[in-house]
Amino acid sequence: MSRSDVAERTDMTEAAKNLRAVPYRGGGFRPGHWRFVGPLVFAVLLLGWEAGSRSGVISNLVLPAPSEALEALRQLVETGQLWLHLGASLQRLVIGWSLGVTLGVAVGLMVGLLPLARAGLLPLVSALFPIPKIALLPLFVIWFGIGEGSKVATILFGSFFPTVIATYGGVDNVDRTLVRMGQSFGLGWWSIVRKIILPGAMPAILSGCRISASIAIILLVAAEMIGAEYGVGAYVLMAGSLFATDQLLAGVAMLSVLGLVVSWLIGRAERRLLRWRG
Amino acid sequence: MDLLLRGISHRYGGTEVMRDINLDIRRGEIVCIIGPSGCGKSTLLRFIGGLERPDAGEVLLSGPEPEGSLNPLTYVFQDFALLPWRTVAGNISLVLEDHGLGKQRVAAIIEDVLARTGLSEFREALPRQLSGGMRQRVAIARALAVRPAVMLMDEPLSALDSQTRELLMDDLVSLWQRERFTACYVTHNLAEAVRLGHRVVVLSRRPGQIRTVVEIDMELSERGPGHPELEAIQSQLWTLLRDEARAADREIADVAE
Ligand SMILES: Nc1ncnc2c1ncn2[C@@H]1O[C@H](COP(=O)(O)OP(=O)(O)O)[C@@H](O)[C@H]1O
Ligand SMILES: [Mg+2]
C-alpha cells in the first residue's frame, strides 16, 4: 500500500466509510451460573402446594399438604422409628451395592483384559443385564430366604451388571500408548493393570457407580416390599396399604434425600479421584 | 553396549514394510533415521526395543550392559506418554517402583534426574499443567531415570511448535555433552537430523530400505541453526529424500482412492 493510498483513506468522511460494529454471534450454548434458581423453584412449588391444600383447592384425600408429610416425618423421628427404617435400608444398600460394585469391577477388568474371559463372559453379561432384577425377586427369596439374603442379593445383582459393562468399556478406552509405555519400561503385568489400566478406567467406573447406585435404590425399595419389618420400602408399603398418604409422602421424601446424598457422595469421590482431569 | 541390526525384513499382511535393514548403533553416538512417512521408521524402532518381532532378521546387543541400568532400551515417545493422573515426580517414580530399590533410593534418583533436566520446581505439577515442551522434558527425565544404554526416540519433538523444538534441541545437545548417551533418533525433520545426528540413515519409501548413511563429522556443540556446512548436508539429504517423499505421498493417495 502506498503512502497516497493511506492518505486517501484517512481523508474519507465517517459516513463514506460506513463504520459499523461487527455483529456478535458467539453467545449461548454454555452452562450458566444460576445456582439459586433450583432451590427457588423447589420453594415456590412447595409453598404453592401448601397454599393450595390450605385453601381447599387441592383435596386432602388426593394429596396431603407438605406440612402434614412433615408432621408424619416428625413423628417418625420422635418415636425413633426413622432410624430403624433408615438403618435397615442403609445396611442393605451399603452391603449389596458395595459387593456388587466390587465384584463388577473385578469381572469387568477380567472381561477387559483377558480375551478368554471376554469370549466366555460377555455374552452372559449381555444376556443377564437387561433382565429387570425385580422379576427375579421371588426366585431370590427361594434361593436366599425371605430375610436379608434375598434383599442384599437383589441389590447386588442389580449393581453388578452395569458396573461390569462400565468397567470393561473403560478398560477398552484406556490409551494404548500408555500401556505400550509401561511395557517398554519393563513394568510387570499386574503393575500395568494397577497403575495404568485401573486409573485410566476410573472415570468410566465412577459413572457406572452413579448408574448402579440409583438402580440399587430402586431395587432396595422393591425388595423391602416383600417380607421386611423395617426399611423405607416397608414403611412406604405399609403407609400405602393404610392410605396414610402423609406417611407415604414422608417415605418418598426420605428416598429422595437418600438418592441425593448418594449422588453427592459419588460426586465427592469423583472430585477426589479424578482431580487430575482438572 | 552396541546395538546391531541384522537383515531385518517385515510385512504386515500383504504389504512389505521393510526390507533387509543392516545397521550398527555404537555406544555414545546419536543415529538419526529419516525417511518419508509410512516407510517403517516407527516399526523399526519397535523392533529395536523389543516391542514387536520382525518376520526376518534380528536385533543383537553386544557388550555388557552399563552398570546399574534398569532398562537398557528406553523409549521417548512422540506424544510423551505421561500418566495424566500422576505428578511429574510420580511419573518418574512409576518406572522405578518395580525394581525394589527402596523408597529413599527412588526419591534420590527422582531428585537427581529432575535436577539434571532443570525440572526440580515442577516436581508436584500434573502433566495437564505443563506446556508440551515441559511434558517432553519430563518424558526425557523419566527415560534418564532408568539409566538407559540406548534411548529410542520416535519423533520426540514432532508434537511441539518450532520454537519449543529449537529449545529442546539445545537441551538435548547439552545433555549429550554431559552424558554421552546413545540414541536412535527417528524424525522426519531434516533440521533435527543434522543438528543431533552423528550419522543420518536415509530410508527409502515403503518397503523401507537403507538408501544411504551420511556421517556428520562435527561436534554437536559447534552445530547451530544456519550453519553453512549443515545447510549443505541438509539440502543434500533433501535431494535424496525428495523423490522418495513425493512417491510415498502419491502412494498414499492411490490407496485412499
Ligand atoms: N500394527 C500394524 N499393522 C498393520 N500395518 C502397520 C502396523 N504398524 C504400521 N503399519 C504400516 O506399516 C507402514 C510403516 O508404518 P510406520 O512404521 O508407522 O511408518 P513411519 O513411522 O515411518 O511413518 C505403514 O504403511 C503402516 O500403515
Ligand atoms: Mg512414525
Image (cartoon, rainbow, N blue to C red):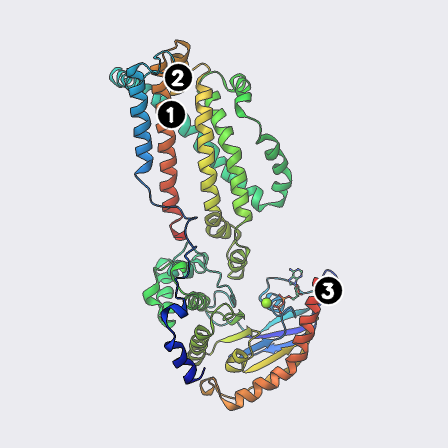
User: How many angstroms separate mark 2 from mark 3 (CA)?
Assistant: 68 Å
Secondary structure beneath disc 1? helix
Residue B90 visible within the image: yes
Q: Which residue in the rendered view is the most extreme toward the bottom?
A: B228
Q: Using the image, tell me which numbered label, if any, was put on residue B15.
A: 3
On whether ligand 1 comes within 8 Å of the CB at mark 3, the answer is yes
- The tag earlier along the polypeptide, 1 or 2, is 2
Q: Foreground residue, A138 or B190?
A: B190
Q: Amino acid at mark 1?
A: Leu
Q: Chain of mark 2?
A: A
Task: Check if mark 2's residue and mark 3's residue have beta carbons within 8 Å.
Answer: no
Give how far across and how far down residue B60 sits, in percent.
62, 71
x, y (%) of residue B212?
Answer: 65, 82
For label 3, the crowd category at 10 Å Cα-Cα, with few meaning under 14, some 14 to 19 and many 20 or more, is few
Residue A22 to residue B224: above or below: above
Indicate the amino acid at tag 3: Thr
| Rendered position, A263 above or below B196 | above
Residue A195 horizontal side relative to residue A135, left or right: left
> Dot 1, crowdedness within 10 Å: few (<14), some or many (≥20)?
some
Q: Residue beneath label 2, please? A: A236
